[in-house]
Image (cartoon, grey):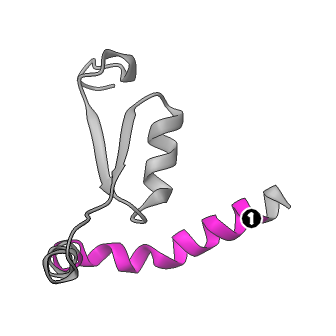
Amino acid sequence: QQLGLSPASGAIHFAQLLGMCDNLTYPLGKSGHSVYKYMPYGKVDEVIPYLLRRAQENSSIFSNSVIEQKAMLKELYQRI
């Protein structure tokens, strides 16, 4: 908003690794932003090093796991 870019402009897209920070992805999508989840695929010996690099680069994500768990439980209870 500060830059004057509306979600509908399509000027900004967000992409995240599948299963990471859904607590950020859903609000972005609900507010109209283009949000994509990606999943690496390939041979295990090629994919694991990539995932390990992502985990090292984003080690702060793991501190949010409690937030993710609470959000999933809340969603589950709402759906039951």
Residue 32: image x %, image y %?
46, 27
x and y, in percent, of residue 46 in the image: 13, 76
44 or 74, nearer to the observer = 44
Where's residue 34, x and y in %?
37, 32
Q: What residue is rendered at 70% in x and 70% in y? A: 73
Location of residue 5 (image quadrant)? top left
Quadrant holding the N terminus: top left
Magenta stretch? Answer: 55-76
Residue found 39% across the figure and 65% down from its top: 20
Would residue 75 be found to the left or right of residue 28 on screen?
right
- How many numbered tags mark residues here? 1
Q: Residue under circle 1?
A: 76
Dominant SS of magenta comes to helix
The percent position of residue 59, horizontal first and vertical second, equals 25, 78
Instruction: Give the vertical position of 5 relative to 65 (above or below).
Output: above
Residue 68 magenta: yes
Neighbour tally class for label 1: few under 14, some 14-19, many 20 plus, Cα within 10 Å:
few
80 lies above or below 56: above
34 in relation to 3, above or below: below
- Residue drawn 44% across the image and 49% down it: 25
Picture quadrant of residue 8: top left
Who is closer to the viewer here, 53 or 2? 53
